[in-house]
Image (cartoon, helix red, strand yellow):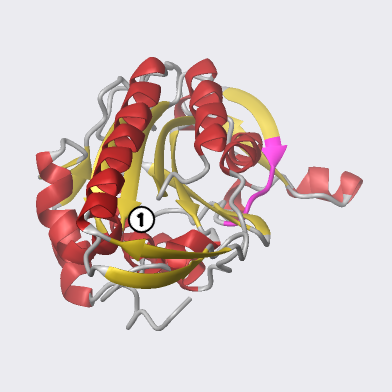
Amino acid sequence: MPETAGLLSPEILARLEGYRLIHHKPVGGATGGLWRARQKGGSSEFVDYREYAPGDEPRRVDWMAYARLRRLYVREYLDERRDCVLFLLDASASMGFGTPLTKEVYAAQVIGGLVACALAGQDQPVLAVTSGAGTAILRPGGRRAGLARSLRFLEATSWGGRADLDGALEAALRTAPSIRSLYLCSDLYEREALTRLLRLAAAREVETTVLHVLAPEEWVPGGEGDWALTDSETGERLELTLTPFALAAYARRLQEFVAALEEECRRWGARRVALNSGEGAQVTLFRTLPRAGVTRPQ
């Protein structure tokens, strides 16, 4: 990833401690959490084992099972099975476009900010990044250590190639079956992959928020004349002349593209929020997302 100056400043992170994610469906939670739990039972009521994942507390590891099986397993109890919030970042090559801030840096900052809101609200975050290099998943744990791990994870993202959105969701659900909310940050150029992701999320009853990121030049292209464009994912080169007629045609195509995405999201019960990387992550986190009903000040 290009230089991010620490991804988010300490001032922004401190301010985000006063913001929370807005859950539009009832979600489960551990005792002492901020949201009403679907499941009931005391913390002494054992439920099952699952494989250890980065971010799990060592005290939850069953060391006797490790001695027998040489694999790490974590004990789960009924009221400690909190629902997870998945933050899925599209790290495909097309996200490297945009000025003065590329979509990739902007998107990583927005996701980092939302993770901070989740942790402040005692949600349990899971991060997934998908690109041509594959899918990476992190369960960062809670509190400040979890936020620091999340930001380092995002800063180390391997960008490029094509994203596997639905494959990343499947992998995340295998890692954390209790995921109940999903925040996808993408430019949504892989329409079929988006449809598959929305279908899977609906089948698993995962509340989905699609953060649709485009650069200022994509929302409103400017500059008439001759241009040579290269597709960042396929390498295909295109030479064209931008005229007022061509720009008007682009505006119509963009409107049709956005309308189709909006309809697809409605079909599968997801909500779409349009974002412009040119406004910067700070404006997005403290103005755009609260106005869109994604976050709220505490």
Find out whether residue 57 is within the magenta segment.
no
Find out whether residue 53 is within the magenta segment.
yes
Residue at x-position 48% and y-position 76%: 1
The three-letter code of the residue at mark 1 reads Ile
Residue at x-position 39% and y-position 16%: 267
Instruction: Where is residue 17? Give x, y as percent.
Output: 19, 57
In which quadrant of the rendered image does the C terminus lie? Answer: top left
Instruction: Where is residue 225? Give x, y as percent.
Output: 29, 71
Residue at x-position 26% and y-position 37%: 255
Q: How many residues crowd mark 1 within 10 Å: few (<14), some (14–19), many (20+)?
A: many
The stretch in magenta equals: 50-54
Instruction: Where is residue 236? Give x, y as percent.
Output: 60, 62
Instruction: Where is residue 41? Give x, y as percent.
Output: 45, 17
The answer to which of 112 and 284 lies nearer the viewer is 284
The answer to which of 261 and 20 lies nearer the viewer is 261
Left-right relation of 40 to 277: right
SS assignment at label 1? helix
Q: Is residue 88 visible?
A: yes
Residue at x-position 41% and y-position 54%: 142
Specify the quadrant of the image occupied by residue 46.
Answer: top right
Q: Tally the marks.
A: 1
Quick check: 143 above or below 156? above
> Which residue is denoted by mark 1 in the rendering?
111
Specify the quadrant of the image occupied by residue 58.
Answer: bottom right
Left-right relation of 141 to 134: left
The answer to which of 163 and 8 lies nearer the viewer is 163
Left-right relation of 289 to 107: left
The answer to which of 183 and 251 lies nearer the viewer is 251
Quick check: 281 above or below 261? below
Quick check: 43 above or below 283? above
Main secondary structure found in the magenta portion: loop
